[in-house]
């Protein structure tokens, strides 16, 4: 029994030393995909901050050992997003919800709207076991480079067959879109329809999603 307690004491001490080391030291040794290299990293693995990583920023995080988990706050599309992961690799729970507007340099393409609700996920190792809740926005707007009302949006996660992110966007009398992103296969299927004279029709034709006279489209992309 004493040996077991000693082992755990040494393990906790070693983890505390590791988490207290500079985050920049360890993150610089990761082979990040192009465009995803962390910028302006400060603090430790225990509690730190980065100016940006990919399209997200700023990002702050804090690790807890006594109640195993990590809490993070990331900026995306000038909105703060709070993510939390609790538990152990073989039995974990995660949540995601919006925390309100953030000030900062706006991206080239800016979509704005107040997202409501929360996503809750339970899983084991890399497998998603169950998901409840959804994120929804009553009025999503394209702010830059054009101004356009996009309509109501919803996002949820389906764990019944792997891990699929399901999203919809609809504006009455204008358009309706459905997207299904397979997070394991890294593949997205997008379908939609537009009404005659819809504001988005010109953009969809410019991107090659709609042909002359067409009002429906389907496309699949790997990423």
Image (cartoon, rainbow, N blue to C red):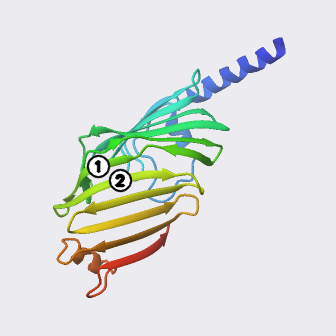
Residue 21 in sight from this viewpoint: no
Query: Badge 2: how crowded within 10 Å, few (<14), some, or many (20+)?
Result: some
Q: Which mark is residue 137?
A: 1
Q: Quadrant of residue 25?
A: top right
User: Above or below — where is 130 with respect to 13?
Assistant: below
| Residue drawn where x is 41% and y is 76% of the image | 218
Residue 10 coordinates in the image, percent (x, y): 72, 20
Gap in Å between the C-alphas at discs 1 and 2? 7 Å
Residue 189 coordinates in the image, percent (x, y): 46, 69
Residue 206 coordinates in the image, percent (x, y): 27, 79
User: Above or below — where is 105 with respect to 178?
Assistant: above
Report helix, strand or loop for mark 1.
strand
Q: Are marks 1 and 2 in contact (CB under 8 Å)?
A: yes
Image-based side of 14 in relation to 25, left or right: right
Report helix, strand or loop for mark 2.
strand
Q: Residue furthest front?
A: 172
Residue 34 in sight from this viewpoint: yes
User: Above or below — where is 198 with respect to 184?
Assistant: below
| Residue drawn where x is 67% and y is 21% of the image | 12
- Quarter of the rendering occupied by the N terminus: top right
User: Above or below — where is 40 with respect to 37?
Assistant: above
Q: Which mark is residue 216?
A: none
Q: Which mark is residue 154?
A: 2
């Amino acid at each position: 029994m004493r040996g077991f307690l000693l082992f755990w004491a040494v393990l906790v001490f070693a983890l505390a030393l590791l988490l207290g080391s500079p985050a920049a030291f360890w993150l610089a040794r990761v082979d990040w995909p192009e465009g995803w290299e962390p910028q302006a990293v400060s603090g430790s693995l225990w509690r730190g901050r980065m100016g940006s990583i990919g399209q997200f920023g700023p990002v702050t995080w804090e690790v807890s050992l006594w109640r195993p988990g990590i809490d993070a706050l990331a900026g995306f599309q000038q909105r703060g997003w709070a993510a939390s992961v609790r538990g152990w690799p073989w039995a974990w729970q995660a949540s995601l919800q919006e925390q309100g507007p953030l000030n900062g340099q706006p991206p080239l393409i800016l979509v704005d709207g107040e997202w409501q609700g929360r996503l809750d996920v339970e899983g084991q190792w890399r497998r998603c076991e169950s998901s409840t809740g959804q994120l929804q926005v009553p009025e999503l707007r394209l702010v830059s480079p054009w101004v356009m009302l996009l309509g109501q949006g919803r996002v949820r996660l389906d764990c019944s067959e792997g891990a699929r992110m399901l999203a919809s966007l609809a504006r009455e009398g204008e358009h309706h879109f459905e997207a299904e992103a397979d997070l394991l296969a890294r593949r997205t299927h997008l379908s939609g329809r537009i009404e005659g004279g819809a504001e988005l029709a010109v953009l969809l034709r410019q991107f090659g999603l709609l042909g002359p006279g067409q009002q429906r489209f389907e496309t699949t992309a790997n990423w």
